[in-house]
Image (cartoon, grey):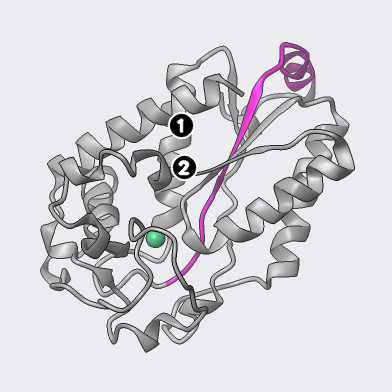
């Protein structure tokens, strides 16, 4: 169910039935020469809608929070970031509003790596203030064990506007992708999605990659995107069913 299309009365009843409220979180930031700046929110929103479709009596999908914490993309035109304090403020106040109405189950379905750290901080702060915590899920974390079935070297080809994101984009919103501009591998020294824990830096992505890409989007296909999307939805339904 689309949260914004419900009445206050409908929502009051849904909250009493212990609805699970999903907030897709994205960012407006450069995604290389070939993907739109809204890629992260577009993917998170489509995942949330698909998850809600599989849990129809349980889920409410809030309007996507398009803006995120993206200072590390600001050297590329089109990036629009908010400061970390602003991001924590907005997400915290969204959660507090819902908690004030008795919502018990809230999940942030995150599509942007830069939001992960603030959302984890937020979850701990909300737990201390309200005695309950939202679930924070950054979608690619759920398929870390299986990503090797899709790409031979996932620790090198998946980072940003990469093999993973470009595959999902080709499946979900191909009309917004510029296939003729898909580059080869870039940004070897930059942060990758499946590289495991290690030392981290907060440098602008321009430092690692002249085109903003980290990974290898040339490996992306719509079919890989479809299979990845189906697996991620399955994993999200399993994770959220336990909340
Ligand atoms: Zn992205």
Residue 216 at x, y = what percent? Answer: 18, 66
Residue 40 at x, y = what percent? Answer: 43, 55
Q: In the picture, which quadrant includes the C terminus?
A: top right
Q: Quadrant of ligand 1?
A: bottom left
Q: Please, is residue 230 above or below residue 38 in the view?
A: above
Residue found 30% across the figure and 79% down from its top: 189
Which residue position is annotated with label 2? Answer: 45
Total of numbered circles in the picture?
2
The crowd level at tag 1 (other Cα within 10 Å; few <14, some 14-19, many 20+) is many
Residue 55 at x, y = what percent? Answer: 49, 17
Which residue position is annotated with label 1? Answer: 49
Residue found 16% across the figure and 68% down from its top: 182
The CA distance from mark 1 to mark 2 is 6 Å
For residue 105, side relative to residue 101 (left or right): left
Using the image as rendered, state which of residue 128 and residue 171 is in the foreground: 128
Residue found 16% across the figure and 73% down from its top: 185
Q: Are the two marked residues, 1 and 2, in contact with CB atoms closer than 8 angstroms?
A: yes
- Ligand 1 within 8 Å of disc 2? The answer is no
Residue found 34% across the figure and 40% down from its top: 143
Residue 180 at x, y = what percent? Answer: 11, 69
- Residue at the extreme front of the image, as rendered: 198
The crowd level at tag 2 (other Cα within 10 Å; few <14, some 14-19, many 20+) is many
Q: Please, is residue 236 above or below residue 10 in the view?
A: below
Q: For residue 161, which numbered disc appears in the image?
A: none
Q: In the picture, which quadrant includes the N terminus?
A: top right
SS category of the residue bearing label 1:
helix
For residue 156, side relative to residue 75 (left or right): left
Query: Is residue 16 in the magenta section?
Result: yes
Where does the magenta region start and end? Answer: 9-29
Query: Is residue 109 in the magenta section?
Result: no
SS category of the residue bearing label 2:
helix
């Amino acid at each position: 169910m689309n949260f914004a299309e419900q009445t206050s009365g409908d929502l009051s009843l849904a909250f009493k039935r212990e609805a699970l409220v999903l907030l897709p979180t994205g960012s407006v930031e450069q995604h290389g020469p070939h993907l739109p700046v809204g890629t992260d929110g577009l993917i998170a929103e489509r995942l949330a809608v698909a998850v809600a479709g599989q849990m129809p009596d349980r889920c409410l999908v809030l309007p996507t929070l398009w803006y995120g914490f993206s200072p590390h993309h600001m050297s590329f035109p089109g990036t629009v970031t908010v400061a970390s304090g602003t991001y924590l403020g907005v997400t915290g106040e969204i959660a507090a509003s819902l908690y004030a109405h008795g919502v018990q189950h809230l999940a942030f379905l995150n599509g942007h790596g830069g939001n992960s750290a603030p959302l984890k901080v937020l979850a701990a702060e909300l737990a201390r203030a309200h005695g309950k915590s939202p679930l924070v899920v950054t979608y690619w974390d759920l398929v870390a064990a299986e990503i090797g079935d899709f790409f031979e070297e996932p620790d090198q080809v998946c980072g940003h506007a990469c093999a993973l994101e470009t595959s999902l984009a080709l499946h979900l919103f191909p009309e917004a992708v510029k296939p003729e501009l898909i580059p080869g591998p870039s940004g070897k020294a930059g942060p990758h999605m499946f590289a495991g824990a290690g030392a981290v830096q907060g440098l602008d992505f321009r430092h690692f990659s002249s085109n903003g890409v980290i990974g290898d989007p040339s490996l992306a296909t719509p079919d890989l995107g479809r299979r990845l999307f189906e697996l991620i939805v399955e994993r999200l339904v399993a994770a959220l069913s336990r909340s």
